[in-house]
Image: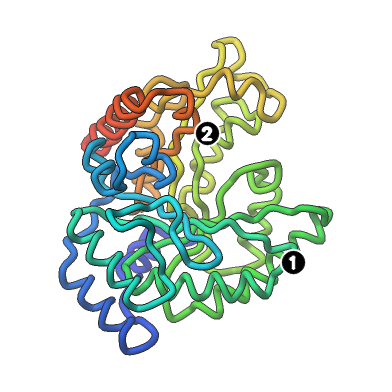
Amino acid sequence: MPSPSTRREFLGHAGRCCLGATAASLCCRHLQAAAAPTAFCAAVRDGMLRSTGEKDSWSALKLIGAEGVEVDVQEDLTLPALRHGAGKYSLTTDAGIEQLRKDVAAAGRRITAFCLRNHFEERPEVETALCTRVARIAQALGVPAIRLDVVPKQLARPEFLKLAIRTLGKIVAASESTGVAFAVENHGTTTNDPAFLQPLFAGVGSQRLGLTLDTGNFYWFGNPLSKVYELYEAFAPRVFHTHIKSIRYPAESREKQRPVGWKYDDCEAAIDRGDIDFARVVAILRKAGYKNDLCIENEFLGKLSPAGTVETLTREVQFLKRLRGQA
């Protein structure tokens, strides 16, 4: 696993050298204009912003006080959930990349990660090309990490693990010059399991492959709360991006081994009202040298009104900012 100093070197390197003259120009201008990134940037996933009732993603981010955003990227390089006055963004052209760069700078926000929804089992070569192209765009925009789905559909786990190692190895090699990290999310029944994650990382053998740490998913998987903290500590040196969410289980169930997904819909909770101690999470990540975002993923916003969404997200953002300021 990479050391804290390795991660600092990686985050300083991300976005330095772009492929192509125009991309290089975009990258250099971005780095000259940007302030030093804030460690533990309070961010949100872009798909949640529509629930605020705001028509523009940048005004929604300002309204709730978020400093950064994770951006969903489709296969055609459109950004379906990130909206501006004229519509949606596309990263298929230099002009589209430049427009996004300007809007990010004008809003005074950061894109802390791109999010891809991969299908490695069905089309490994397509995914290799897509991930490599998105890594080049990420470098041009100073985006340090790309969140990945590593989910089997039909293959048995041993065969899928071999395929995932082989494909991710190709992706890491093809994007070597970008310095951008790839961050597998722990979710579902496969990548929530350390028995899959550990050989995956070891098999690829790259310091640029790590984790999008979803704090709620290890708990959702059925682990007792004390074991959840052990998993955070074990994988903290591999974390390049986060999904911050919580669950509030009945007190008598928190330290029990529960079925996967047990009563999740009934027990979803805001991050300041759930079982997970995020001061402890921040301390674990800080000790490991983590420098990127704390990105809120609130999965019950559909149950709230726009006003309730704004109140909840604003409160969660302020909660993360307070934790960041604690020693």
User: Which residue matches tag 2?
Assistant: 216
Tell me if residue 128 comes above or below residue 17 in the rendering.
above
Residue 258 sits in which quadrant? top right
Q: Viewed as shown, does residue 205 lie left or right of 310?
A: right
Residue 234: percent from left, percent from top: 53, 45
Q: Nearer the viewer, residue 77 or 312?
A: 77
In front: 293, or 253? Answer: 293
Q: Amino acid at mark 2?
A: Gly
**Position above or below: 61 against 9:** above
Kindly identify which numbered label has been placed on residue 163.
1
Q: Residues within 10 Å of mark 2 (few under 14, many from 20)?
A: many
Q: Residue at x 23, y 78 (%)?
A: 28
- In this picture, residue 22 sits left or right of residue 63: right
* Quarter occupied by the C terminus: top left
* Rendered location of residue 247, percent (x, y): 51, 24
Mark 2–mark 1 Cα distance, whole angstroms, equals: 27 Å
The amino acid sitting under disc 1 is Leu
Callout 2: helix, strand or loop?
Answer: helix
Q: How many marks?
A: 2
Residue 121's x, y, as percent? 74, 62
